[in-house]
Amino acid sequence: MKQCTNNEELLENINEEILKHQMDYEKNEIEKIKKVFEEIINVKTENANSIGDKFISLVGSDHMAVYYLKSIWIIELLIKILENSKGNKTRTIFCVAVLGDLYYFGLDDLDELSIEEYEIEEKKIKQKLSLYTGKIGKELIKKCEDKEETVDLKLKRKENQNQLIEMDTLLN
């Protein structure tokens, strides 16, 4: 997805990405996904918690602390929104908070995958989500709250991915 200059362009690009998956969902589910992403793009502090709950319900179950393999693309779409949230403090904090929470969830599709496939898929999404949790996530939020500088999330994400690769190499 290309870098967007405004909310309308971002929403248009998000809707195009959602439509690529329309064969995997009922029409009402696609509309629900579109509506939640529209709310995310226009998130305000006062409605962030309810939108976060809706997003979690799209990708999995908050009560079971799981997300579904079928929904990983939706999580990745939230990452793309975050990358296009430069200068939008509320949306940046929202995305980092939700992605950070999802890090502590587990993949729930063990029955659909072999153990090896499950471990590979879970490791891939955990690596992506780890970039928005703990110290790294707090740092991204602090920079937004302090308004010291606008974070170039793609560069920061790349730096963190390189750190994870180095740590993974050292561990193996």
Image (spheres, helix red, strand yellow):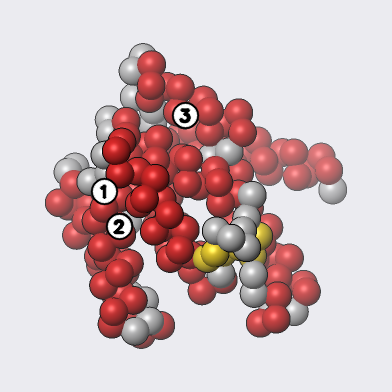
Q: Residue at x 74, y 39 (%)?
A: 167
Q: Is residue 25 above or below residue 77?
A: below
Where's residue 140, x and y in %? 47, 29
The answer to whether residue 142 is left or right of residue 61 is left
The crowd level at tag 1 (other Cα within 10 Å; few <14, some 14-19, many 20+) is many
Under circle 3, the secondary element is helix
Identify the residue under disc 2. 37
Q: Residues within 10 Å of mark 3 (few under 14, many from 20)?
A: many
Closest to the observer, 107 or 56: 56
Question: Does the CB distance between marks 1 and 3 fall below 8 Å?
Answer: no
What number is the disc on residue 140? 3
Query: What label sits on residue 158 in the rendered view?
Result: none
Closest to the observer, 137 or 163: 137
Distance between the alpha carbons at the discs numbered 3 and 2: 21 Å
Cα separation between marks 1 and 3: 18 Å
Residue hosting label 1: 41
The residue under the point 34% across, 24% down is 150
Identify the mark nearer the N-term, 1 or 3.
1
Q: Position of residue 143 (x, y in %)?
A: 42, 22
In the picture, residue 134 is in which quadrant?
top right
Quadrant (top left, top right, bottom left, bottom right) of the N terminus: bottom left
Mark 1 vs 2: CB contact within 8 A: yes
In the figure, is residue 19 to the left or right of 66? left
Q: Residue at x 30, y 57 (%)?
A: 37
From the viewer's perspective, is the residue at label 1 or at label 3 nearer?
A: 1
For residue 161, what is the image quadrant? Answer: top right
Q: Amino acid at mark 1?
A: Ile
Name the amino acid type tagged 2: Phe
Of residues 45 and 121, the one drawn nearer to the viewer in this rendering: 45
